[in-house]
């Protein structure tokens, strides 16, 4: 049984799933601070976010394999390219994951209205379009933009919206550091795969701008997230206690140092996982700070 389940766990890419959890935490923390928190909204948002993330990971695995982008890669094993699962199996699982997200979305629509339907459809389209379809935007250097928008801004603000159908300014502002760090996760992935992506014709932003500029981009995203937390907190645009988020600056600095000093696969895999954990830790800190004010 374990042997049957293991490929599916690998395909879901558990280390990246914190990227889906963190914005929901922040939205829930903001709602708690405003006295409008709903457990049912929080739970449905969390299920929907995780299901979309898993579906996106499944779709990326199958799509990259079909385009030859996962051959000779230095990262974790991709299940379709390695033959552990067939493309058809993974696409079916993608459909199941999207169906689960849709069920969670239907409940959220019933309590928060049609806006959630628009967000859900757009999020699914963005997840599928990353490496799927005739013109995947992930192959044209646009992945970072879409990740920042959908997994940062949209995910955070929507996670606040479902509690009482409002999107206050502080939700938009805290969505900025969430967007920065989740985008840094993608940058860490792409800088690790830079050479193999270039060989496969996958024109990620890292391939287009090169390693030195990608290293600078990673640093800008990490430090930009902490700068945003500081500026918004000291300006009283977000709850003062959200300044707790800057406690993780040393963690972020260590990740930036590693990205800037190595091209080896294993350390860069560690950066990818570490950046996802940083997203969770900062998200939890912002959620806690938002809840207590």
Image (spheres, grey):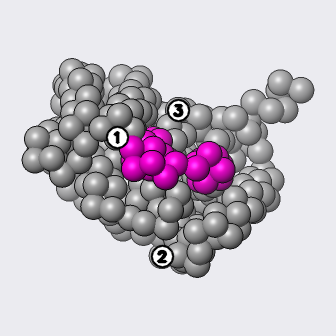
Q: CA distance from mark 3 to mark 2?
A: 28 Å
Q: How many marks?
A: 3
Q: Which residues are magenta?
A: 22-47
Residue sticking out furthest to the right: 1
Report crowding for label 2: few under 14, some 14 to 19, many 20 or more residues within 10 A (C-alpha). Answer: few
Q: Secondary structure at mark 1?
A: helix
Q: Earlier in the sequence, mark 1 or mark 2?
A: 2
For label 3, the residue is: 15
Task: Pick the residue in front: 259 or 195.
Answer: 259
Q: Nearer the viewer, mark 3 or mark 2?
A: 3
One can see residue 98 in this view: no
Residue sticking out furthest to the front: 35
Horizontal side of 181 relative to 247 (left or right) equals: right
Q: CA distance from mark 3 to mark 1?
A: 25 Å
Q: Residue at x 26, y 29 (%)?
A: 244
Q: Residue at x 59, y 38 (%)?
A: 13
Q: CA distance from mark 1 to mark 2?
A: 40 Å
The secondary structure that dominates the magenta segment is: helix
């Amino acid at each position: 049984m374990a042997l049957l389940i293991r490929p599916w766990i690998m395909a879901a890419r558990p280390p990246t799933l914190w990227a889906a959890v963190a914005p929901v935490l922040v939205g829930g923390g903001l709602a708690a601070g405003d006295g409008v928190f709903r457990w049912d909204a929080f739970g449905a948002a969390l299920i929907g976010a995780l299901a979309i993330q898993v579906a996106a990971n499944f779709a990326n695995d199958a799509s990259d394999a079909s385009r030859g982008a996962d051959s000779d890669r230095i990262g974790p094993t991709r299940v379709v390219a390695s033959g552990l699962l067939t493309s058809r199996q993974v696409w079916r699982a993608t459909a199941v994951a999207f169906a689960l997200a849709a069920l969670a979305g239907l409940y959220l629509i019933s309590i928060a209205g049609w806006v959630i339907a628009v967000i859900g459809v757009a999020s699914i389209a963005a997840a599928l379009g990353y490496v799927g379809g005739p013109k995947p935007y992930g192959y044209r250097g646009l992945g970072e933009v879409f990740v920042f928008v959908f997994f940062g801004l949209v995910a955070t603000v929507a996670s606040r919206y479902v509690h009482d159908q409002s999107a206050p300014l502080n939700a938009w502002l805290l969505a900025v550091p969430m967007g920065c760090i989740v985008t840094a996760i993608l940058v860490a992935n792409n800088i690790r795969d830079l050479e193999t992506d270039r060989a496969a014709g996958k024109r990620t932003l890292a391939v287009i701008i090169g390693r030195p500029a990608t290293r600078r981009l990673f640093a800008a995203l990490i430090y930009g997230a902490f700068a945003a937390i500081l500026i918004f907190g000291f300006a009283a645009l977000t709850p003062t206690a959200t300044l707790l988020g800057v406690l993780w600056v040393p963690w972020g600095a260590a990740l930036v140092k590693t990205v800037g000093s190595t091209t080896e696969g294993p350390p860069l895999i560690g950066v990818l996982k570490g950046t996802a954990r940083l997203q969770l830790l900062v998200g939890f800190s912002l959620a806690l700070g938002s809840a207590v004010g």
